[in-house]
Image (cartoon, rainbow, N blue to C red):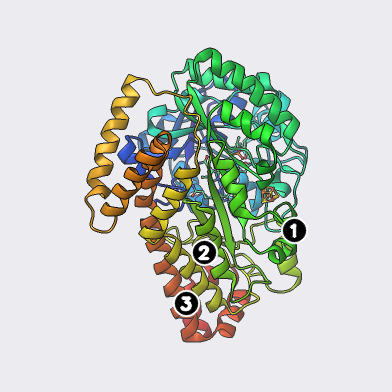
Amino acid sequence: MKHLMEKGTKCLIVQSRFSPFGFWNYVDVCRIAGAKYPATPLGLMTVAALLPQQWDFKLIDENVEPLRTEHLEWADIVCVGGMLPQQQGMLSIIDRAHQHGRPVVLGGPDPSSQPHLYQSADYLVHGEGEISIPLLLQELGKGCGSGEYKSDEKADMTNAVVPRFDLIRFEDYIQVGIQFSRGCPFYCEFCDVTELYGRESRTKTPEQVLKEIQTLYDLGHRGHIDFVDDNFIGNKKHAREVLTAIKGWSEAKKHPFYFSTESSINLADDDGLLQLMKDVDFRYVFIGIETPDDEILKLTNKTINVNKPVAPAVRKISSYGMIVNAGFIIGFDNESDQTAENMTRCVQDSGIPMAMVGRLYALPKTQLTRRLHLEGRLFENASTLTDVTKDIDQATSGLNFVTARPRVDVLKDYANVLQYIYDPAQYYARVISTCLSLRPANKHKPGFVKKLKTARAFLRLCARIGFNRTTGWLYWKTLLTIGLKNPKAIEAAVNLAAMFIHFQKHTRFVIDLTNKEVESIESIGEETFNYGMRQGGRNAIASKESLLTEVN
Ligand code: B12
Ligand code: SF4
């Protein structure tokens, strides 16, 4: 066998596929835009930069191309990594690599949170690659054939490497991810970010960020860059410094990029930061709103959102040119019969078009999981996902515990919220409301080829939804209203209108699954269901249906 630390070792890096029915995986819209998948595999490009640079790398992202036998035959070593919904995908890549006699290195958020599930990997790397990959390399240098590598240390982001952006084709993706910070100062009970990355927002320096942006520029990328931070403004002082640096760079280069990110809602309180974000052309920001109810927020320790009326905050951010996307959650302990109605009203009044409503998910290693375990309410092993067609994200998984309200009520509320907010008339009303308040900077101007692609995408979009019986009238009404009243926001209106194609598909899928779940719980009774799920463990979770029959 080849000594893996030799020059020219062939390293195959594989990103497993996400479900096209997941909220985030809007592949139909990507196709209209001429791409294949929304987001780039940043973790794996970072891993490639941390491995020996005298190796040869090939990165296969199953979201854009299939993993073929010839890829595995080419490799001396295979690297795989990913998050919870990729669990089965990662395990099956390990099996395929082993069938070809190739050793596998595995890492990433889910293998770090649930290493016991991934013991089939030859080398299991926990936590942040910047810390654990050097430990792996030491062992590979000694010719070691397997092992686990972990450390509780957190990476110093000021030493972070520039990811190997050269390993992907930019045209396959809508946006390219880069990371400025890890960690978040807040401590929401359900969140795994603070457990995995800590409560200090560890940031790269402005020089490092500019180097990454310059690398993307030199490699020919133009357009959308997504800052994949847990909370971009976790350290406001550093956020200001990096934005100031990007501003200077962008002006000198005539704004080749525009940006998006994730932030806590207190962004709305900081006009200085908002202005800087507008200056560099931030167009989208994802905010965890979770619920409009202050009592629920307090219980789940999302204190940063308490006493922060959502609609004014959203309008303020829109007035600085950014569309707010938001996360909402159903299933908290102190919800009431009013919860669903309050949530739909909040989404509708604030005009947030892209609202990701999920079920509360006790993710591995969170405070919530620990509390539910102590209370005897946790469905142990429910984060072992076995059905790739259903366990796709927190819209279909989640509620992996005995709910405080009757489970059927929670599920029905969930379906009702989705039904309402993704009704075409309600969705397009929100698009209009957002685009009327949007004051976009539009600093980035696409080049000629991009303009042609955009024109082609627009025609495809018109053909797909403009002449459709359900959406046609709403689509044209939206474009006409924004075209006449706030023409600067017309591009945003077209993009949001396009996203309905995905949300309609996603919502139908989720509501259908939820209704089936309600039916099966009603048929056996909730107590039996909860008993079975708590007792059932891994095998039971593997086949919820057979469990239901069994306990009956
Ligand atoms: C950006 C992001 C997203 C984006 C984009 C994802 C993408 N394709 O790029 C979007 C918004 C789509 C998303 C969605 C989801 N996400 Co997300 N996401 C993130 C976030 C904030 C950053 C990811 C990132 O790019 N990090 C930067 C890179 C450099 O870090 P990394 O990927 O972790 O890789 C490092 C290490 O893990 C390790 N490593 C990674 N892979 C490998 C492989 C090998 C071989 C080795 C040795 C090491 C290694 O080395 C790298 C360098 O240190 C993380 C939190 C975080 N801070 O990482 C959550 C996170 C990954 N997401 C998570 C989850 C749960 C989800 C969702 C399921 C639910 C949700 N939060 O909405 C969905 C479903 C995704 C889908 N596509 O269907 C959890 C995962 C928990 C788990 N146990 O797996 C995280 C940790 C936090 C969270 N709750 O959001 N997410
Ligand atoms: S603000 Fe967001 S990232 Fe920070 S702890 Fe709360 S949920 Fe997690």
Q: Secondary structure at mark 1?
A: loop
Residue at 55% from the left image edge and 39% from the top image edge: 319
Say which label, 1 or 3, has the lower sequence index.
Answer: 1
Front-most of 82 and 445? 445
Instruction: Check the image and name the residue furthest to the top.
Output: 252
Q: Which residue is denoted by mark 1 in the rendering? A: 301
Q: Is residue 62 visible?
A: no
Front-most of 228 and 338? 338
- Where is 404 relative to 280, above or below? below
Residue at 63% from the left image edge and 61% from the top image edge: 292
Residue type at the position of mark 2:
Thr
Alpha carbon of mark 2 to alpha carbon of mark 3: how far?
21 Å
The nearer-to-camera label among 1 and 2 is 2
Residue type at the position of mark 1:
Asn
> Relative to 199, is 66 on the left or the right?
left
Q: Is mark 1 within 8 Å of ligand 2?
A: no
Residue type at the position of mark 3:
Val
Alpha carbon of mark 1 to alpha carbon of mark 3: how far?
29 Å
Q: Is residue 140 visible?
A: yes
User: Residue 322 location, x and y as percent?
Assistant: 53, 38
Q: Which residue is denoted by mark 3 in the rendering? A: 518
User: Residue 357 location, x and y as percent?
Assistant: 52, 59
Alpha carbon of mark 1 to alpha carbon of mark 2: how far?
22 Å
Label 3 crowd bin: few (<14), some (14–19), many (20+), radius 10 Å: some
Q: Secondary structure at mark 2?
A: helix
Q: Is mark 3 within 8 Å of ligand 1?
A: no
Q: Quadrant of residue 100?
A: top left
Q: Quadrant of residue 65?
A: top left
Q: Which residue is denoted by mark 2 in the rendering? A: 344
Q: Secondary structure at mark 3?
A: helix
